[in-house]
Image (cartoon, rainbow, N blue to C red):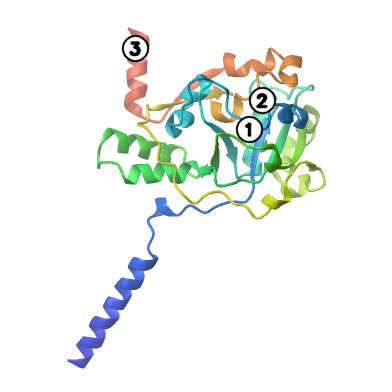
Amino acid sequence: MQENFFSLLFNLSFLIVFLFFYIPPSYAIHPVNIVYRADTRNLAEIYAVNGMRPWENQRVDYDLIHHFDGESVDDYTSAFVSTSSSLSQSVEHAASLARANSEEPFDDDFRIFIYAIRPGLNFYNVEGSIAHARDNSVENSPRRLGLSAILQTYGAMEEWVALEGIATDRIISFIELTGEMLQRYYQSDQLVSHTFWANRWQPNSGYNVANDHDISTVEFYTNIGDPRGYRNVIQIDTQHQLPTSFICITPNSESAKKRQVKNNICQFRKGRHFYLINRLVAALDNNFK
């Protein structure tokens, strides 16, 4: 009798501990204290417009899925600015703009900046927020299937969006990436190494050191609509696409003026990447009608 009692007590204790520590995967958002963003503007240009801000528009779209899919990015209505917690991912995004496709050489005149940024509580994790929305959707509903398809197709995302933009005093430092550097170092993978950039970061004198201990939010962003089934991308070649939320950012920058045709790739090489097969089939059917 006593043995059964202790066995029951042990099992009950195990269950309590399990329930206390078990957190569904979509609920485990781990905050970050540094993110990166590639931008064709230099620091002075960013200061001139009071930071990295969404486009000014009478209509502002706060739906995260519209930003993720690129719908509100193309309409210049998105309330978000995209960043990545991965330096290597940001370098790859930047490098993709320096040539028409992976078979061509990098443009000699190419120049872009990668900014290191201290996030605040307005920085939301995209993957965690979408996973939370999926887990709270009706089982087998089109919404749940669409959100699940996003997570399966674009897993291990390291994207953080800044709601209503990034103030200049959160920009810690920046590096400059040129076509010459890409020609010299890209194949060796040195450009995605923190060691390579260690002595190349240039500080932002306007950075507020009071932000040093700030981190991104652990909350989910909850304004998430229904997925449309495809994402607007920049088509680099048959194997590589980049989301427009990371790339189409500064058509009025000095860099764009100097390289007007080449830097207008957001207009000339736009495509769609389908994550829902039924939407792809429907699109193909429409093209053949």
Look at the picture and state if 151 lies above or below 255.
Answer: below
Answer with left or right where residue 17 lies relative to residue 3.
Answer: right
How many angstroms separate mark 1 from mark 3 (CA)?
32 Å
Query: In which quadrant is the N terminus drawn?
Result: bottom left
**Identity of the amino acid at label 2?**
Leu
Using the image, tell me which numbered label, if any, was put on residue 205. none
Answer with left or right where residue 36 lies relative to residue 190.
Answer: left
Extreme residue toward the bottom, this view: 2
Cβ atoms at labels 1 and 2 below 8 Å apart: yes
Q: Residues within 10 Å of mark 3 (few under 14, many from 20)?
A: few
The x and y percentages for residue 84 are: 59, 41
Which residue was labeled with disc 2? 97
Extreme residue toward the left, this view: 1
Using the image, tell me which numbered label, if any, was put on residue 286. 3
Which residue was labeled with disc 1? 93
**Identity of the amino acid at label 3?**
Asn
Which of the two discs, 1 and 3, labels the residue nearer the N terminus?
A: 1
Cβ atoms at labels 1 and 3 below 8 Å apart: no
Look at the picture and state if 245 lies above or below 138.
Answer: above
